[in-house]
Amino acid sequence: MKKTMLDKAVRKESRKLKRLKKAQKIQKRVAARSSAKRSTKKRGAGCKVLKVFGKIFALLAALYAALFAVFFFDLDGKLMYYVVEPFLVKHYDKMDRKNPLDMPYEIKK
Amino acid sequence: MKLPDIKLPKPSDLTGKLKAFAGLFPDPRDVKLPKNAAEAKKAAHDFWYGKPHGERRLGDLYLDKTGLYKHREWRGVKDTFYYFHMIWLYNYANMVMDIMKFGDPITFAKGLWRYRWMGQTYLPVLHWFDRGLEGLRGEALRASAWHYRAMTCVTINQFMNMFEADGNLRNGAHNDAWHHAMAHKETVWGGIFYPWADKYKHIPLEMIPYFVTCHVNNHTVLNYIDAAQSIGLPGDPCPMCQAEAGLFVLDDMPDFAPFMVSSNEACDGSVASTAIQDWFFKGPLFAMPQPMQFDDPLVQEHCANEIRECWKFIEEQTGAPFNLQLLNENLEKQNELQRFEWEKWDVAAKTNHYPINGVAQALYRIYQSQYGEHFIWHDTDKKVSKILTKCVEKKIDTFPKTRHRVIAWSCAPLYYSNWCTWAYNCWGLNTIINMDSLMFDMTIRTDNLDNTVMDMARYHEWAPMRRMAVGGMHHIFELWENMERFNCDMVMMYDQLQCKGMQGVVGLFEDEFRKRNIHAIWMPHALPDKRTVSRGEIRRIINDYMSTVMKEEPLDPSLLEFDDDMSW
């Protein structure tokens, strides 16, 4: 009877130990995971900055290439000649203007 | 219910339009791939350094009639990117900066919407750079471009000053800027107004609406010439005077100042244009004509008195006193510009290291000497001085294909001021100097007011078209000594067909050319009006002389004949 009581107590203790060990293991795993998360977070922030710089660089490069294309193919000249100038000329031709001949010609005092 | 008719473009129209659009660009089929290693090496060399003069075929770059480029010139990696960064981008950016510096974008937009000469001319300004700087390389490209940049800056300054003060943009209301502006005819030297430079802005009436527009976009001026004739004025006097009067007739002159100082434009044919301006200009006018016989000491005295009278008039109109210190300070600054100009002339005359091409030299000089003191001239001269020193120290042959050193005499065609760029590229005719550059060949004494006024009178008398065009035989024949001074072997003799003064001396010049055995090409033109003698006609005359009399072959045959009648 005593033996069985003792066995029971030992088994109980060993179960407790096992549970403790499990809990420790879990704690370790959680700690490891969170530290991993932290490090990946750090790495992610660096990547994001790089990505933003990359995007800005790509945008500037595209803008530079576009400007060079405008320059090289005289697109500014063509736009002015075929679009802007005719549009403005139409506007100036339609404008109401004073007739200066209506002004009397007299010697100013 | 009837549906509205929708007009769809016909497929043939679309193809036509697409073809026309594609025609604005270089044809890829024209690209020749290298066939062997030697050709590949040559292509790589041309890509890196640009094609040598003679292989460039600049005429192939033009679109027919318009003068636009299929593509801008490839000048080698270094010069193409210099042009892209330091000329094209730099000037577009600085045009915006200048507008902000001298005014604000809203006033600029209002002025652009109101005035034809503004909208039609100043937007395509970079094309004016292109035409003047075609074919240039290295230091010549850099120095000439700085001259263009300075002229653009002063131009923006002037029209922004006009718009800031303009009553037309403010429903006739006159603001403080209007009360602090002084208008004057473009041939009245800006130096007359130096004593009020701290508080008042002097703005030439026609320098921007007329003179500069002819160079940048010569379509604009035709409206004003026709307007003057439309009120019954004869078409045969100088078209410059017609255009200047036409600005008022078309109601296209800003109302920016309460009074004006006028002259006879140094050409007595234009007295009538001042009469018309006086009619249409609302405020009081002071007339200060440049005398015809200016070598006479009594005339000199008379002219000095007129300047003093003009100062009194300005004092009365502004209520601000004459400031001698300000006058002397500004004159000294202008003298500095003149001294550097002499340095430039010295290099141009004695060496082949002068890095400024004919059109940049001519326009910058006349603009600077006529408008007067401005900070940008000093900035530009500093930059050009560095380039000039480098060219002389390193003995750089800036225009290596020069066959003839040319002096250009009399008044130039404003619609084709870049003819000298074409003439160098096509025939190796290098325009070293021109009459307009040499007019104000003096500094002004500032030791006492009497000397200052006498020198200012002399400067005023030596106005454009007076000193060496219609200023008497002695002065017009200064050509011979200047030919010698600048070591020139050829004359480009401008023949302004509507200038009665110059028409009278054609025969005398021809006699002298024969007697002195000088090669001279007569270039007929009608100053701002391209309809009388086209640019193509001017080129044909030069081509004929070079091939039949000089028996020379063109450096670039693609430039011999092309149609740019509709070009800016």
Image (cartoon, coloured by chain):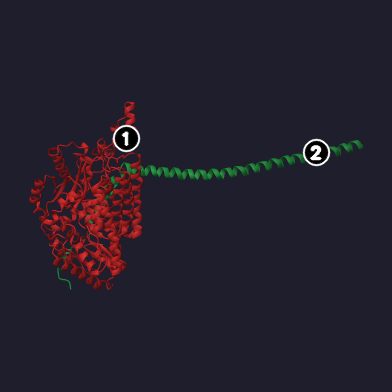
Q: Quadrant of the N terminus of chain A?
A: top right
Label of residue A56 in the image? none
Give B2 or B389, whichever is nearer the viewer: B389
Marker disc for residue A15: 2
Q: Do dots 1 and 2 share one subunit?
A: no
Residue in the foreground of this view, choosing between B198 and A2? B198
Q: CA distance from mark 1 to mark 2?
A: 87 Å
Residue under label 1, please give it. Answer: B46
Residue B553 in sight here: yes
Can residue B119 be seen here?
no
The letter of the green chain is A
Colour chain B is painted in? red
Per the image, label 1 sits on a secondary structure element best described as: helix
Instruction: State whether residue B468 is above or below residue B319.
Output: above
Q: Nearer the viewer, residue A6 or B359?
A: B359
- Amino acid, disc 1: Asp
Question: Residue at the location (23% across, 41% down)?
Answer: B402
Q: Position of residue B442 (x, y in %)?
A: 23, 59
